[in-house]
Amino acid sequence: MIIPYGMIDTQVNGYLGYDYSDPLFESGRARRICSALVEKGTIQHFATIVTRPEEVILRNIDAVIRAVSEDSLVNRCLTGIHIEGNFISPLDGPRGAHDIKYVRPADMGEFDRWLEHSRGLLKYITIGAEAEGSVDLIKHAVSCGVTVALGHTGATKEQIERAVDAGASVSTHLGNGIFQSLDRFENPLWPQLRDSRLTSAVIADLCHVTPDLLWIISRCKNPGNIILVSDLAPCAGLPKGRLKWGNMDVEIAEDCSVRLSGTPYLAGAGSVLLKNVFNWAKHTETSLQDAIDSATVVPIRKYGLEFREDDWLETDDEGTLLKVCLGGVVHVIQ
């Protein structure tokens, strides 16, 4: 089976121990992430930087831009930056594993500095619809050509509607970054599922979202409004066991998910995007072509990327990767 364009993962926190949000992140690490992900079928990805002090975010944006400018492989593979955080819910549950010390109200000036440093590579930001100043920031970001996603939010229906009216157009990892227990009528999930203006980004690893919820999302959203992502944690791909992620103690579980040590709570994902694509097709009973489009065509159109006909993958019918073609050069996967 030939998959055109290769997998395009718009939410990658890092891989194999390399972390785009690490205060000590260096540009050379971007090549290691890109090279390792290509071998798993992810030809393009967006570097995700999570809730951190502004100086760390700017420093790491600069490191990414340096890598893109200096390294041809990174230039081809790292095609966007996603800032996920700062302007999110401070509440337990919606905040997820983001550090509460750095959660703060929406700041237009800070966004402008992100934009200036990113030199056009900032593709989208994730904010909470209830964050102070969120509506004004959404309008401003969209006017600057940056997509705004809603995520890590415990917002009301009315707050979500105001955010979408202002221009928010994506739900970041829908079904996650939310309260552990939800009111059956009033919760942040239903209005995001219902609103056709919102594209749902989904982690289809069967840990972050159950097969039942995958099926429901597939019925609420048309195929052109679904983007499959991995949300890979920096420790993804490492051996199972306990590890440090920043100031958090985490462990890689048997199902490859990343969890806060000693708890059932998720701290990140460990399944690469190609696996999630085949999970989506299997558990939603939709076509494999629609699943592939959700990790290729839909993000290309949503974020204004190139349709690269000299990038493709070959897999067997079970999703095992056989070959990667990057820029017309074929690599056989052993």
Image (cartoon, rainbow, N blue to C red):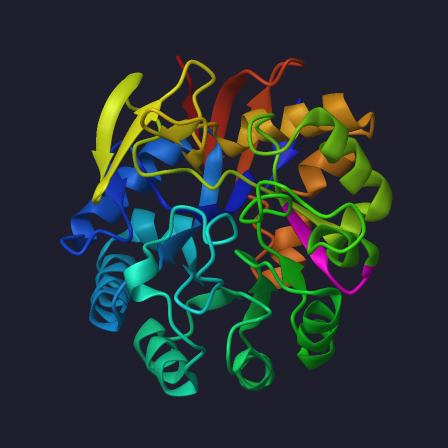
Give the residue displayed 35% in from the left and 55% down from the top. 75
Closer to us: 60 or 241: 241
Query: Is 62 placed left or right of 131 in the picture?
Result: left
Closer to us: 50 or 69: 50
Closer to us: 307 or 154: 154
* Relative to 38, residue 93 above or below: below
Q: Is residue 198 magenta?
A: yes
Query: Is 20 placed left or right of 37 in the picture?
Result: left
Camera sees residue 11? yes
Camera sees residue 268? no
* Relative to 244, residue 303 above or below: below
Quarter where residue 210 is shown: top right
Give the residue displayed 58% in from the left and 47% down from the top. 179
- Location of residue 100 in the rendering, given as x and y in whole percent from the top left corner: 34, 58
Query: Is 284 placed left or right of 127 in the picture?
Result: right
- Location of residue 239 in the rendering, given as x and y in whole percent from the top left corner: 28, 17
Give the residue displayed 13% in from the left and 53% down from the top. 24
* Relative to 256, residue 80 above or below: below
- Magenta region: 195-201
- Location of residue 281 in the rendering, given as x and y in whole percent from the top left corner: 74, 27
* Relative to 271, residue 140 above or below: below
Quarter where residue 203 is shown: top right
- Location of residue 324 in the rendering, given as x and y in whole percent from the top left corner: 48, 29
Q: Is residue 334 magenta?
A: no
Q: Quadrant of the N terminus?
A: top right
